[in-house]
Amino acid sequence: MLRSIKPKGWKIALYLCIPVIWYVFSVFVPLITAVFYSFFEWKGGPKKTFIGLDNYISLIKDGTFWQSFGHNIYLVIACIIGQVGIAFIFVLIVNSRLVKLKGIHRTFGFFPSTISAVCIGFIWTMIYDYKRGILNWFLTATGHGDSVQVWLNNPKLVMFLVAIPLVWQFIGYYMVILLSAISSVDTEIFEVAELDGANAFQRAIYIVLPLIKNTLLVCITLCVAGNMKAFDHIFTMTEGGPGTSSMVMAMYGYKISFAQMNMGYGSAISVGIFIVSLVVIGGSQKLVNLLMQGKGVE
Amino acid sequence: MAQMEEIKGSYTTADKVKRGILGFFLNALMIIFSASCIFPLIWMFYSSLKTKRVFNADIIGLPTAPTIENYIKIMTNQDYHIGQSMVASVRTTVLSLFFIVLFGFIVGYILSRIKFKGNRILYVMFLMGMLIPVHSLLVPIYVVFNKTGLGNQWFTLVIPYVAFGLPMAVFLVEGFIKAIPVELEEAAAIDGSSFTRTLFSIILPVAKPILVTIAIIQVFSCWNEFSFALVLIKDVRLQTVPLAMTMFKGQFASDYPKIMSAMLTTMAPIVVLYFIFSKQIIKGMVAGAVKG
Protein backbone atom coordinates (compact mmCIF):
# COMPACT_ATOMS: atom_id res chain seq x y z
CA MET A 1 0.00 0.00 0.00
CA LEU A 2 1.14 3.52 -0.68
CA ARG A 3 1.96 5.45 2.48
CA SER A 4 4.21 8.36 1.71
CA ILE A 5 1.79 9.79 -0.82
CA LYS A 6 -1.83 9.39 -0.12
CA PRO A 7 -3.98 10.83 -2.87
CA LYS A 8 -7.03 12.75 -1.75
CA GLY A 9 -10.21 10.82 -1.07
CA TRP A 10 -12.33 12.71 -3.57
CA LYS A 11 -9.87 11.93 -6.31
CA ILE A 12 -10.07 8.21 -5.62
CA ALA A 13 -13.85 8.41 -5.45
CA LEU A 14 -13.90 10.23 -8.77
CA TYR A 15 -11.81 7.53 -10.41
CA LEU A 16 -13.86 4.72 -8.93
CA CYS A 17 -17.36 6.08 -9.35
CA ILE A 18 -17.94 5.39 -13.06
CA PRO A 19 -16.61 1.79 -13.11
CA VAL A 20 -18.37 0.92 -9.87
CA ILE A 21 -21.73 2.43 -10.87
CA TRP A 22 -21.45 0.77 -14.29
CA TYR A 23 -20.70 -2.57 -12.70
CA VAL A 24 -23.36 -2.40 -10.01
CA PHE A 25 -25.95 -1.30 -12.54
CA SER A 26 -25.38 -4.28 -14.82
CA VAL A 27 -24.74 -7.01 -12.25
CA PHE A 28 -26.47 -6.23 -8.97
CA VAL A 29 -29.44 -4.19 -10.16
CA PRO A 30 -30.68 -6.99 -12.46
CA LEU A 31 -30.14 -9.51 -9.70
CA ILE A 32 -32.28 -7.54 -7.28
CA THR A 33 -34.85 -6.89 -10.01
CA ALA A 34 -35.08 -10.62 -10.64
CA VAL A 35 -35.71 -11.31 -6.98
CA PHE A 36 -38.37 -8.56 -6.93
CA TYR A 37 -40.30 -9.75 -9.99
CA SER A 38 -40.07 -13.37 -8.94
CA PHE A 39 -42.80 -12.62 -6.38
CA PHE A 40 -45.22 -11.47 -9.07
CA GLU A 41 -47.31 -13.03 -11.73
CA TRP A 42 -46.28 -10.90 -14.66
CA LYS A 43 -46.75 -11.62 -18.37
CA GLY A 44 -44.61 -8.72 -19.53
CA GLY A 45 -47.52 -6.29 -19.77
CA PRO A 46 -48.47 -3.45 -17.40
CA LYS A 47 -50.43 -5.78 -15.10
CA LYS A 48 -48.56 -7.37 -12.21
CA THR A 49 -50.08 -9.38 -9.37
CA PHE A 50 -48.22 -10.11 -6.18
CA ILE A 51 -48.34 -13.86 -5.54
CA GLY A 52 -45.70 -14.27 -2.86
CA LEU A 53 -43.75 -17.48 -3.08
CA ASP A 54 -46.07 -19.16 -5.59
CA ASN A 55 -43.49 -18.94 -8.39
CA TYR A 56 -40.92 -20.66 -6.24
CA ILE A 57 -43.35 -23.36 -5.21
CA SER A 58 -44.10 -24.10 -8.86
CA LEU A 59 -40.37 -23.99 -9.60
CA ILE A 60 -39.64 -26.66 -7.02
CA LYS A 61 -42.39 -28.82 -8.49
CA ASP A 62 -41.41 -28.03 -12.09
CA GLY A 63 -40.17 -31.28 -13.62
CA THR A 64 -38.79 -29.54 -16.70
CA PHE A 65 -36.59 -27.26 -14.61
CA TRP A 66 -35.08 -30.18 -12.76
CA GLN A 67 -34.73 -32.14 -15.97
CA SER A 68 -32.80 -29.16 -17.40
CA PHE A 69 -30.70 -29.06 -14.27
CA GLY A 70 -29.95 -32.75 -14.79
CA HIS A 71 -28.84 -31.99 -18.33
CA ASN A 72 -26.51 -29.27 -17.04
CA ILE A 73 -24.99 -31.78 -14.66
CA TYR A 74 -24.73 -34.29 -17.49
CA LEU A 75 -22.80 -31.73 -19.51
CA VAL A 76 -20.56 -30.90 -16.55
CA ILE A 77 -19.66 -34.56 -16.07
CA ALA A 78 -19.26 -35.20 -19.79
CA CYS A 79 -16.97 -32.21 -20.07
CA ILE A 80 -14.87 -33.00 -17.02
CA ILE A 81 -14.28 -36.51 -18.31
CA GLY A 82 -14.15 -35.54 -21.97
CA GLN A 83 -12.35 -32.22 -21.92
CA VAL A 84 -10.07 -32.37 -18.90
CA GLY A 85 -9.60 -36.14 -19.07
CA ILE A 86 -8.79 -36.33 -22.76
CA ALA A 87 -6.73 -33.15 -22.51
CA PHE A 88 -4.68 -34.75 -19.73
CA ILE A 89 -4.02 -37.84 -21.85
CA PHE A 90 -3.12 -35.68 -24.85
CA VAL A 91 -0.74 -33.68 -22.69
CA LEU A 92 1.06 -36.88 -21.69
CA ILE A 93 1.24 -37.92 -25.34
CA VAL A 94 2.39 -34.55 -26.65
CA ASN A 95 4.96 -34.31 -23.90
CA SER A 96 6.53 -37.68 -24.65
CA ARG A 97 9.68 -37.69 -26.72
CA LEU A 98 8.08 -39.84 -29.38
CA VAL A 99 5.69 -37.21 -30.64
CA LYS A 100 6.59 -34.52 -33.16
CA LEU A 101 4.86 -31.31 -34.28
CA LYS A 102 4.09 -30.04 -30.79
CA GLY A 103 3.65 -26.46 -31.95
CA ILE A 104 1.14 -27.48 -34.62
CA HIS A 105 -0.94 -29.52 -32.18
CA ARG A 106 -1.00 -26.59 -29.82
CA THR A 107 -2.03 -24.01 -32.43
CA PHE A 108 -4.59 -26.18 -34.23
CA GLY A 109 -5.95 -27.79 -31.08
CA PHE A 110 -6.58 -24.43 -29.46
CA PHE A 111 -8.24 -22.98 -32.54
CA PRO A 112 -11.84 -24.23 -32.05
CA SER A 113 -12.06 -22.56 -28.64
CA THR A 114 -11.70 -19.16 -30.30
CA ILE A 115 -14.69 -19.68 -32.58
CA SER A 116 -18.19 -18.57 -31.62
CA ALA A 117 -20.66 -21.15 -30.39
CA VAL A 118 -22.93 -20.21 -33.28
CA CYS A 119 -20.31 -21.36 -35.80
CA ILE A 120 -19.47 -24.49 -33.84
CA GLY A 121 -23.16 -25.31 -33.54
CA PHE A 122 -23.64 -24.80 -37.26
CA ILE A 123 -20.67 -27.01 -38.17
CA TRP A 124 -22.01 -29.82 -36.02
CA THR A 125 -25.57 -29.42 -37.24
CA MET A 126 -24.04 -29.95 -40.67
CA ILE A 127 -22.33 -33.10 -39.46
CA TYR A 128 -25.56 -34.47 -37.98
CA ASP A 129 -27.77 -33.29 -40.87
CA TYR A 130 -30.06 -35.94 -42.28
CA LYS A 131 -29.71 -35.43 -46.02
CA ARG A 132 -26.36 -33.72 -46.37
CA GLY A 133 -24.63 -34.53 -43.10
CA ILE A 134 -21.12 -35.95 -42.91
CA LEU A 135 -22.12 -38.57 -40.34
CA ASN A 136 -24.83 -40.08 -42.52
CA TRP A 137 -22.59 -39.78 -45.57
CA PHE A 138 -19.90 -41.70 -43.72
CA LEU A 139 -22.33 -44.37 -42.52
CA THR A 140 -23.64 -44.90 -46.03
CA ALA A 141 -20.15 -44.96 -47.49
CA THR A 142 -19.03 -47.61 -45.02
CA GLY A 143 -22.08 -49.78 -45.59
CA HIS A 144 -24.07 -48.96 -42.46
CA GLY A 145 -26.85 -47.30 -44.42
CA ASP A 146 -29.53 -48.75 -42.14
CA SER A 147 -28.39 -46.71 -39.10
CA VAL A 148 -28.83 -43.43 -40.98
CA GLN A 149 -31.24 -41.17 -39.08
CA VAL A 150 -32.23 -37.61 -38.19
CA TRP A 151 -29.71 -37.56 -35.37
CA LEU A 152 -30.76 -34.49 -33.44
CA ASN A 153 -34.39 -35.63 -33.43
CA ASN A 154 -33.61 -38.70 -31.41
CA PRO A 155 -34.56 -37.85 -27.80
CA LYS A 156 -32.42 -40.67 -26.43
CA LEU A 157 -29.25 -39.59 -28.19
CA VAL A 158 -29.62 -35.84 -28.33
CA MET A 159 -27.81 -34.96 -25.08
CA PHE A 160 -24.90 -37.15 -26.06
CA LEU A 161 -24.77 -35.59 -29.50
CA VAL A 162 -24.80 -32.00 -28.23
CA ALA A 163 -22.15 -32.84 -25.66
CA ILE A 164 -19.71 -33.95 -28.38
CA PRO A 165 -19.20 -30.50 -29.94
CA LEU A 166 -18.83 -28.93 -26.49
CA VAL A 167 -16.22 -31.47 -25.49
CA TRP A 168 -14.40 -31.27 -28.82
CA GLN A 169 -14.31 -27.48 -28.85
CA PHE A 170 -12.42 -27.16 -25.58
CA ILE A 171 -10.09 -30.18 -25.47
CA GLY A 172 -7.34 -28.09 -27.02
CA TYR A 173 -8.02 -25.25 -24.61
CA TYR A 174 -7.48 -27.44 -21.56
CA MET A 175 -4.60 -29.23 -23.26
CA VAL A 176 -2.77 -25.93 -23.66
CA ILE A 177 -3.45 -24.89 -20.06
CA LEU A 178 -2.16 -28.21 -18.74
CA LEU A 179 0.84 -28.14 -21.10
CA SER A 180 1.90 -24.77 -19.77
CA ALA A 181 1.58 -26.09 -16.22
CA ILE A 182 3.79 -29.08 -17.05
CA SER A 183 6.36 -27.05 -18.94
CA SER A 184 7.09 -25.16 -15.72
CA VAL A 185 8.13 -28.44 -14.10
CA ASP A 186 11.76 -29.49 -14.34
CA THR A 187 12.01 -32.20 -17.01
CA GLU A 188 14.66 -34.01 -15.00
CA ILE A 189 11.93 -35.29 -12.69
CA PHE A 190 10.47 -37.30 -15.56
CA GLU A 191 13.85 -38.67 -16.56
CA VAL A 192 14.72 -39.73 -13.06
CA ALA A 193 11.36 -41.44 -12.71
CA GLU A 194 11.97 -43.26 -15.97
CA LEU A 195 15.34 -44.39 -14.71
CA ASP A 196 13.77 -45.64 -11.52
CA GLY A 197 11.67 -47.91 -13.66
CA ALA A 198 8.34 -46.12 -13.41
CA ASN A 199 6.21 -46.95 -16.43
CA ALA A 200 4.25 -44.36 -18.33
CA PHE A 201 1.07 -44.99 -16.38
CA GLN A 202 2.77 -44.75 -13.00
CA ARG A 203 4.54 -41.57 -14.06
CA ALA A 204 1.21 -40.05 -15.08
CA ILE A 205 -0.54 -40.87 -11.82
CA TYR A 206 2.22 -40.40 -9.28
CA ILE A 207 4.35 -37.66 -10.76
CA VAL A 208 2.53 -35.59 -13.36
CA LEU A 209 -0.85 -35.54 -11.65
CA PRO A 210 0.31 -34.21 -8.26
CA LEU A 211 2.59 -31.67 -9.92
CA ILE A 212 -0.22 -30.06 -11.88
CA LYS A 213 -2.86 -30.59 -9.21
CA ASN A 214 -3.68 -26.91 -8.83
CA THR A 215 -3.99 -26.30 -12.53
CA LEU A 216 -6.24 -29.33 -12.82
CA LEU A 217 -8.41 -27.87 -10.10
CA VAL A 218 -8.67 -24.63 -12.04
CA CYS A 219 -9.64 -26.58 -15.16
CA ILE A 220 -12.37 -28.46 -13.35
CA THR A 221 -13.73 -25.26 -11.86
CA LEU A 222 -13.77 -23.65 -15.31
CA CYS A 223 -15.54 -26.72 -16.65
CA VAL A 224 -18.23 -26.68 -13.99
CA ALA A 225 -18.86 -22.94 -14.25
CA GLY A 226 -18.82 -23.07 -18.06
CA ASN A 227 -21.37 -25.85 -18.31
CA MET A 228 -23.77 -24.55 -15.69
CA LYS A 229 -24.28 -21.64 -18.07
CA ALA A 230 -24.51 -23.74 -21.24
CA PHE A 231 -26.84 -21.94 -23.62
CA ASP A 232 -25.33 -20.85 -26.93
CA HIS A 233 -24.54 -24.32 -28.27
CA ILE A 234 -27.93 -25.70 -27.29
CA PHE A 235 -29.71 -22.67 -28.74
CA THR A 236 -28.02 -23.02 -32.13
CA MET A 237 -28.27 -26.78 -32.35
CA THR A 238 -31.59 -27.90 -30.86
CA GLU A 239 -33.21 -25.04 -28.90
CA GLY A 240 -33.74 -27.63 -26.19
CA GLY A 241 -35.64 -30.03 -28.40
CA PRO A 242 -36.99 -32.41 -29.41
CA GLY A 243 -39.54 -31.61 -26.73
CA THR A 244 -37.40 -30.90 -23.71
CA SER A 245 -34.88 -33.69 -24.23
CA SER A 246 -31.90 -31.35 -24.55
CA MET A 247 -33.22 -28.47 -22.42
CA VAL A 248 -30.72 -26.77 -20.13
CA MET A 249 -31.52 -24.28 -17.37
CA ALA A 250 -30.61 -21.07 -19.19
CA MET A 251 -32.50 -22.25 -22.28
CA TYR A 252 -35.58 -23.01 -20.18
CA GLY A 253 -35.46 -19.61 -18.50
CA TYR A 254 -35.18 -17.99 -21.93
CA LYS A 255 -38.10 -19.96 -23.36
CA ILE A 256 -40.41 -19.25 -20.43
CA SER A 257 -39.53 -15.55 -20.42
CA PHE A 258 -39.42 -14.73 -24.11
CA ALA A 259 -41.41 -17.38 -25.94
CA GLN A 260 -44.22 -17.51 -23.36
CA MET A 261 -43.60 -13.96 -22.07
CA ASN A 262 -43.99 -15.28 -18.54
CA MET A 263 -41.55 -12.78 -17.04
CA GLY A 264 -42.53 -13.34 -13.41
CA TYR A 265 -41.89 -17.05 -13.53
CA GLY A 266 -38.87 -16.42 -15.75
CA SER A 267 -37.41 -14.22 -13.01
CA ALA A 268 -38.00 -16.97 -10.46
CA ILE A 269 -36.18 -19.39 -12.77
CA SER A 270 -33.30 -16.90 -13.03
CA VAL A 271 -33.02 -16.77 -9.26
CA GLY A 272 -33.23 -20.57 -9.25
CA ILE A 273 -30.39 -20.85 -11.79
CA PHE A 274 -28.36 -18.43 -9.70
CA ILE A 275 -28.75 -20.41 -6.49
CA VAL A 276 -28.38 -23.85 -8.04
CA SER A 277 -25.24 -22.82 -9.96
CA LEU A 278 -23.60 -21.31 -6.91
CA VAL A 279 -24.33 -24.47 -4.92
CA VAL A 280 -22.94 -26.73 -7.65
CA ILE A 281 -19.84 -24.60 -8.25
CA GLY A 282 -19.12 -24.26 -4.53
CA GLY A 283 -19.87 -27.90 -3.83
CA SER A 284 -17.70 -29.16 -6.66
CA GLN A 285 -14.77 -27.11 -5.41
CA LYS A 286 -15.13 -28.56 -1.92
CA LEU A 287 -15.35 -32.04 -3.39
CA VAL A 288 -12.28 -31.62 -5.59
CA ASN A 289 -10.29 -30.22 -2.66
CA LEU A 290 -11.30 -33.16 -0.54
CA LEU A 291 -10.41 -35.72 -3.20
CA MET A 292 -7.07 -34.10 -3.87
CA GLN A 293 -6.19 -34.03 -0.19
CA GLY A 294 -7.22 -37.67 0.17
CA LYS A 295 -4.54 -38.61 -2.33
CA GLY A 296 -1.93 -37.46 0.13
CA VAL A 297 0.79 -37.00 -2.48
CA GLU A 298 3.04 -33.98 -2.99
CA MET B 1 22.77 -37.95 -17.70
CA ALA B 2 25.53 -40.38 -18.67
CA GLN B 3 23.58 -43.13 -17.03
CA MET B 4 20.60 -42.08 -19.10
CA GLU B 5 22.56 -42.44 -22.35
CA GLU B 6 23.78 -45.85 -21.28
CA ILE B 7 20.27 -47.05 -20.74
CA LYS B 8 19.15 -45.67 -24.06
CA GLY B 9 22.05 -47.45 -25.75
CA SER B 10 21.11 -50.75 -24.18
CA TYR B 11 17.65 -50.84 -25.77
CA THR B 12 17.25 -54.07 -27.67
CA THR B 13 15.98 -54.15 -31.23
CA ALA B 14 12.65 -55.42 -30.02
CA ASP B 15 12.36 -52.42 -27.71
CA LYS B 16 13.15 -50.08 -30.57
CA VAL B 17 10.48 -51.64 -32.76
CA LYS B 18 8.00 -51.42 -29.93
CA ARG B 19 8.80 -47.76 -29.38
CA GLY B 20 8.58 -47.16 -33.10
CA ILE B 21 5.10 -48.63 -33.31
CA LEU B 22 3.94 -46.82 -30.20
CA GLY B 23 5.37 -43.56 -31.55
CA PHE B 24 3.57 -44.05 -34.82
CA PHE B 25 0.22 -44.56 -33.11
CA LEU B 26 0.65 -41.64 -30.72
CA ASN B 27 1.67 -39.35 -33.56
CA ALA B 28 -1.23 -40.54 -35.67
CA LEU B 29 -3.69 -39.95 -32.82
CA MET B 30 -2.51 -36.40 -32.26
CA ILE B 31 -2.49 -35.64 -35.98
CA ILE B 32 -6.07 -36.88 -36.30
CA PHE B 33 -7.09 -34.66 -33.39
CA SER B 34 -5.36 -31.58 -34.80
CA ALA B 35 -6.82 -32.27 -38.23
CA SER B 36 -10.32 -32.55 -36.75
CA CYS B 37 -9.87 -29.09 -35.26
CA ILE B 38 -8.90 -27.47 -38.51
CA PHE B 39 -10.82 -29.58 -41.01
CA PRO B 40 -14.21 -27.87 -40.51
CA LEU B 41 -12.62 -24.57 -41.49
CA ILE B 42 -11.10 -26.05 -44.65
CA TRP B 43 -14.25 -27.95 -45.51
CA MET B 44 -16.36 -24.83 -45.07
CA PHE B 45 -13.96 -22.88 -47.25
CA TYR B 46 -13.97 -25.14 -50.25
CA SER B 47 -17.66 -25.92 -49.88
CA SER B 48 -18.48 -22.21 -49.90
CA LEU B 49 -17.00 -22.12 -53.41
CA LYS B 50 -19.65 -24.55 -54.65
CA THR B 51 -23.16 -23.74 -55.73
CA LYS B 52 -26.06 -25.15 -53.75
CA ARG B 53 -26.79 -27.77 -56.43
CA VAL B 54 -23.21 -29.02 -56.59
CA PHE B 55 -22.94 -29.16 -52.80
CA ASN B 56 -26.15 -31.14 -52.40
CA ALA B 57 -24.93 -33.70 -54.91
CA ASP B 58 -21.58 -34.21 -53.19
CA ILE B 59 -21.00 -32.76 -49.74
CA ILE B 60 -17.41 -33.81 -49.25
CA GLY B 61 -15.68 -33.54 -52.64
CA LEU B 62 -13.61 -30.60 -53.80
CA PRO B 63 -15.40 -28.13 -56.08
CA THR B 64 -14.77 -28.87 -59.76
CA ALA B 65 -15.75 -25.39 -60.87
CA PRO B 66 -15.05 -23.07 -57.92
CA THR B 67 -17.10 -19.90 -57.87
CA ILE B 68 -17.16 -16.88 -55.57
CA GLU B 69 -20.80 -16.26 -56.45
CA ASN B 70 -21.89 -16.90 -52.83
CA TYR B 71 -19.52 -14.26 -51.52
CA ILE B 72 -20.67 -11.71 -54.08
CA LYS B 73 -24.28 -12.39 -53.14
CA ILE B 74 -23.85 -12.04 -49.39
CA MET B 75 -21.72 -8.92 -49.65
CA THR B 76 -23.87 -7.08 -52.18
CA ASN B 77 -27.32 -7.90 -50.84
CA GLN B 78 -28.06 -5.30 -48.17
CA ASP B 79 -30.95 -7.38 -46.82
CA TYR B 80 -28.53 -9.94 -45.44
CA HIS B 81 -26.91 -7.40 -43.08
CA ILE B 82 -23.56 -9.19 -43.23
CA GLY B 83 -21.37 -6.12 -43.59
CA GLN B 84 -23.56 -4.23 -41.17
CA SER B 85 -23.28 -6.91 -38.50
CA MET B 86 -19.50 -6.87 -38.83
CA VAL B 87 -19.46 -3.11 -38.35
CA ALA B 88 -21.65 -3.51 -35.27
CA SER B 89 -19.38 -6.25 -33.90
CA VAL B 90 -16.22 -4.26 -34.50
CA ARG B 91 -17.74 -1.19 -32.85
CA THR B 92 -19.02 -3.14 -29.84
CA THR B 93 -15.76 -5.07 -29.42
CA VAL B 94 -13.49 -2.04 -29.70
CA LEU B 95 -15.55 0.07 -27.30
CA SER B 96 -15.86 -2.79 -24.78
CA LEU B 97 -12.14 -3.48 -24.92
CA PHE B 98 -11.31 0.16 -24.37
CA PHE B 99 -13.48 0.46 -21.28
CA ILE B 100 -12.56 -2.93 -19.82
CA VAL B 101 -8.87 -2.19 -20.08
CA LEU B 102 -9.21 1.39 -18.80
CA PHE B 103 -11.54 0.59 -15.88
CA GLY B 104 -9.78 -2.65 -15.07
CA PHE B 105 -6.50 -0.76 -14.88
CA ILE B 106 -7.82 2.06 -12.70
CA VAL B 107 -9.84 -0.11 -10.32
CA GLY B 108 -7.19 -2.83 -10.12
CA TYR B 109 -4.51 -0.26 -9.34
CA ILE B 110 -6.52 1.52 -6.66
CA LEU B 111 -7.59 -1.73 -5.00
CA SER B 112 -4.05 -3.01 -4.80
CA ARG B 113 -2.29 0.19 -3.73
CA ILE B 114 -4.56 2.56 -1.86
CA LYS B 115 -5.99 1.98 1.58
CA PHE B 116 -9.42 3.43 2.11
CA LYS B 117 -12.66 2.52 3.77
CA GLY B 118 -14.51 0.10 1.56
CA ASN B 119 -11.45 -1.20 -0.26
CA ARG B 120 -12.20 -4.75 0.84
CA ILE B 121 -15.91 -4.35 0.16
CA LEU B 122 -15.18 -3.35 -3.42
CA TYR B 123 -12.72 -6.22 -3.72
CA VAL B 124 -15.32 -8.75 -2.61
CA MET B 125 -17.91 -7.16 -4.86
CA PHE B 126 -15.73 -7.67 -7.91
CA LEU B 127 -14.84 -11.16 -6.72
CA MET B 128 -18.55 -11.97 -6.63
CA GLY B 129 -18.76 -10.87 -10.23
CA MET B 130 -16.52 -13.78 -11.16
CA LEU B 131 -18.67 -16.25 -9.24
CA ILE B 132 -22.09 -15.02 -10.31
CA PRO B 133 -23.43 -17.20 -13.09
CA VAL B 134 -24.04 -14.45 -15.64
CA HIS B 135 -26.61 -16.49 -17.50
CA SER B 136 -28.99 -16.16 -14.60
CA LEU B 137 -28.97 -12.45 -15.50
CA LEU B 138 -30.30 -12.91 -19.05
CA VAL B 139 -33.93 -12.27 -18.21
CA PRO B 140 -33.50 -9.62 -15.49
CA ILE B 141 -31.03 -7.62 -17.57
CA TYR B 142 -33.57 -7.53 -20.37
CA VAL B 143 -36.19 -6.19 -17.95
CA VAL B 144 -33.87 -3.52 -16.53
CA PHE B 145 -32.63 -2.39 -19.93
CA ASN B 146 -36.13 -2.19 -21.32
CA LYS B 147 -37.39 -0.12 -18.38
CA THR B 148 -34.51 2.32 -18.60
CA GLY B 149 -34.59 2.57 -22.39
CA LEU B 150 -31.03 1.29 -22.66
CA GLY B 151 -32.03 -1.74 -24.72
CA ASN B 152 -31.69 -1.95 -28.47
CA GLN B 153 -29.28 0.97 -28.92
CA TRP B 154 -25.94 1.03 -30.73
CA PHE B 155 -24.12 1.10 -27.38
CA THR B 156 -26.40 -1.37 -25.55
CA LEU B 157 -24.12 -4.40 -25.61
CA VAL B 158 -21.08 -2.46 -24.46
CA ILE B 159 -22.71 -2.10 -21.02
CA PRO B 160 -22.94 -5.79 -20.05
CA TYR B 161 -19.74 -6.74 -21.87
CA VAL B 162 -17.74 -4.20 -19.89
CA ALA B 163 -19.43 -5.13 -16.62
CA PHE B 164 -18.86 -8.86 -17.08
CA GLY B 165 -15.31 -8.42 -18.38
CA LEU B 166 -14.36 -6.12 -15.55
CA PRO B 167 -13.92 -8.56 -12.62
CA MET B 168 -11.27 -10.62 -14.38
CA ALA B 169 -9.49 -7.48 -15.60
CA VAL B 170 -9.49 -6.03 -12.08
CA PHE B 171 -7.98 -9.18 -10.61
CA LEU B 172 -5.32 -9.58 -13.26
CA VAL B 173 -4.26 -5.93 -12.83
CA GLU B 174 -4.42 -6.15 -9.04
CA GLY B 175 -2.18 -9.21 -8.99
CA PHE B 176 0.23 -7.63 -11.45
CA ILE B 177 0.51 -4.31 -9.61
CA LYS B 178 1.23 -6.08 -6.31
CA ALA B 179 4.43 -7.42 -7.84
CA ILE B 180 5.67 -3.94 -8.80
CA PRO B 181 7.80 -2.21 -6.11
CA VAL B 182 6.06 0.74 -4.41
CA GLU B 183 9.31 2.74 -4.67
CA LEU B 184 8.41 3.45 -8.26
CA GLU B 185 5.46 5.63 -7.28
CA GLU B 186 7.17 7.04 -4.21
CA ALA B 187 10.02 8.29 -6.34
CA ALA B 188 7.53 9.82 -8.73
CA ALA B 189 5.68 11.50 -5.86
CA ILE B 190 8.91 12.97 -4.50
CA ASP B 191 9.58 14.39 -7.95
CA GLY B 192 6.23 16.13 -7.69
CA SER B 193 4.20 13.94 -9.99
CA SER B 194 0.46 14.06 -9.33
CA PHE B 195 -1.61 10.92 -8.78
CA THR B 196 -3.15 11.11 -12.23
CA ARG B 197 0.20 11.66 -13.89
CA THR B 198 1.83 8.78 -11.99
CA LEU B 199 -1.07 6.53 -12.86
CA PHE B 200 -1.03 7.14 -16.58
CA SER B 201 2.55 7.98 -17.47
CA ILE B 202 4.45 5.76 -15.03
CA ILE B 203 2.27 2.80 -14.03
CA LEU B 204 0.43 2.36 -17.33
CA PRO B 205 3.57 1.57 -19.40
CA VAL B 206 4.76 -0.87 -16.74
CA ALA B 207 1.40 -2.64 -16.69
CA LYS B 208 1.20 -2.92 -20.47
CA PRO B 209 1.79 -6.72 -20.65
CA ILE B 210 -1.14 -7.52 -18.40
CA LEU B 211 -3.37 -5.03 -20.22
CA VAL B 212 -2.53 -6.75 -23.52
CA THR B 213 -3.44 -10.11 -21.96
CA ILE B 214 -6.79 -8.72 -20.85
CA ALA B 215 -7.45 -7.26 -24.29
CA ILE B 216 -6.65 -10.59 -25.98
CA ILE B 217 -9.07 -12.53 -23.80
CA GLN B 218 -11.81 -9.98 -24.23
CA VAL B 219 -11.50 -9.66 -28.02
CA PHE B 220 -12.65 -13.24 -28.37
CA SER B 221 -15.34 -13.17 -25.73
CA CYS B 222 -16.85 -9.91 -27.02
CA TRP B 223 -16.73 -10.92 -30.68
CA ASN B 224 -18.32 -14.31 -29.99
CA GLU B 225 -20.80 -13.33 -27.27
CA PHE B 226 -24.26 -14.49 -28.20
CA SER B 227 -26.81 -14.72 -25.40
CA PHE B 228 -26.91 -11.09 -24.28
CA ALA B 229 -26.99 -9.93 -27.88
CA LEU B 230 -29.92 -12.25 -28.46
CA VAL B 231 -31.88 -10.84 -25.55
CA LEU B 232 -31.00 -7.15 -25.79
CA ILE B 233 -30.92 -6.41 -29.52
CA LYS B 234 -34.10 -6.38 -31.58
CA ASP B 235 -33.11 -4.08 -34.44
CA VAL B 236 -31.57 -6.05 -37.34
CA ARG B 237 -29.25 -3.15 -38.12
CA LEU B 238 -27.67 -3.40 -34.68
CA GLN B 239 -27.12 -7.15 -34.67
CA THR B 240 -23.64 -8.38 -33.91
CA VAL B 241 -22.10 -11.20 -35.92
CA PRO B 242 -23.23 -14.25 -33.89
CA LEU B 243 -26.80 -12.95 -33.81
CA ALA B 244 -26.84 -12.10 -37.52
CA MET B 245 -25.50 -15.58 -38.30
CA THR B 246 -28.29 -17.21 -36.32
CA MET B 247 -30.91 -15.27 -38.26
CA PHE B 248 -29.13 -15.88 -41.55
CA LYS B 249 -28.97 -19.59 -40.85
CA GLY B 250 -32.69 -19.70 -40.20
CA GLN B 251 -33.45 -17.78 -43.36
CA PHE B 252 -31.41 -19.95 -45.73
CA ALA B 253 -31.76 -23.25 -43.93
CA SER B 254 -31.21 -25.31 -47.08
CA ASP B 255 -28.54 -23.26 -48.83
CA TYR B 256 -25.49 -24.52 -46.97
CA PRO B 257 -22.76 -23.09 -49.20
CA LYS B 258 -24.27 -19.64 -48.79
CA ILE B 259 -24.40 -19.99 -45.00
CA MET B 260 -20.80 -21.20 -45.03
CA SER B 261 -19.61 -18.23 -47.03
CA ALA B 262 -21.35 -15.89 -44.58
CA MET B 263 -19.88 -17.74 -41.58
CA LEU B 264 -16.38 -17.61 -43.04
CA THR B 265 -16.64 -13.93 -43.91
CA THR B 266 -17.72 -13.01 -40.40
CA MET B 267 -15.16 -15.34 -38.83
CA ALA B 268 -12.33 -13.99 -40.96
CA PRO B 269 -11.13 -11.17 -38.66
CA ILE B 270 -10.86 -13.54 -35.70
CA VAL B 271 -9.26 -16.37 -37.67
CA VAL B 272 -6.67 -14.09 -39.25
CA LEU B 273 -5.92 -12.53 -35.87
CA TYR B 274 -5.55 -15.97 -34.33
CA PHE B 275 -3.17 -17.41 -36.87
CA ILE B 276 -0.95 -14.32 -36.94
CA PHE B 277 -0.67 -13.95 -33.17
CA SER B 278 -1.41 -17.51 -32.06
CA LYS B 279 1.60 -17.69 -29.72
CA GLN B 280 0.72 -14.51 -27.83
CA ILE B 281 -2.99 -15.31 -27.87
CA ILE B 282 -2.53 -18.78 -26.42
CA LYS B 283 -0.15 -17.42 -23.80
CA GLY B 284 -2.55 -14.65 -22.85
CA MET B 285 -5.60 -16.89 -22.66
CA VAL B 286 -3.79 -19.41 -20.49
CA ALA B 287 -2.50 -16.72 -18.13
CA GLY B 288 -6.01 -15.29 -17.87
CA ALA B 289 -7.63 -18.64 -17.22
CA VAL B 290 -5.19 -19.76 -14.58
CA LYS B 291 -4.76 -16.49 -12.69
CA GLY B 292 -8.35 -15.38 -13.11
Image (cartoon, rainbow, N blue to C red):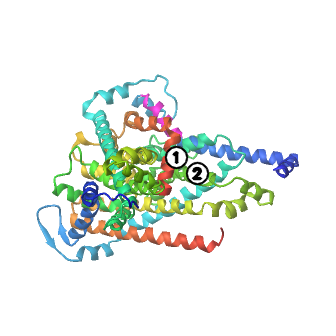
Instruction: Pick whichever, B193 or A65, lies toward us.
Output: B193
Choose top left, top right, bottom left or bottom right for residue A254. Answer: bottom left
* Image coords of residue B230 (percent x, y): 29, 50
For the residues labelled 2 and 1, say whether their Cβ atoms are less than 8 Å apart: yes
Residue at the spot of label 2: A180
Q: Which of the numbered marks, if any, corresponds to residue B283?
A: 1
Choose top left, top right, bottom left or bottom right for residue B36. Answer: top right
Q: Which contiguous range is marked in magenta?
A: B38-50
Farthest left residue in view: A46
Q: Is residue B116 left or right of residue B290?
A: left
Whether residue A172 appears in this view of the structure is: yes
For label 1, the SS is helix
Is A218 contained in the magenta span? no
Q: Residue at x 57, y 40 (%)?
A: B35
Q: Residue at x 33, y 44 (%)?
A: B98
Circle 2 marks a residue in which chain? A
B288 shown above or below A106: below
Instruction: Pick whichever, B131 or B31, lies toward us.
Output: B131
B267 shown above or below B189: above
Circle 1 marks a residue in which chain? B
Compute the Cα span from label 2 to label 1: 9 Å
In the rendered structure, which amino acid carries the disc numbered 1?
A: Lys
* Image coords of residue A154 (percent x, y): 44, 56
Q: Main secondary structure of the magenta part?
A: helix
Is B46 contained in the magenta span? yes
State whether discs 2 and 1 lie on one chain: no
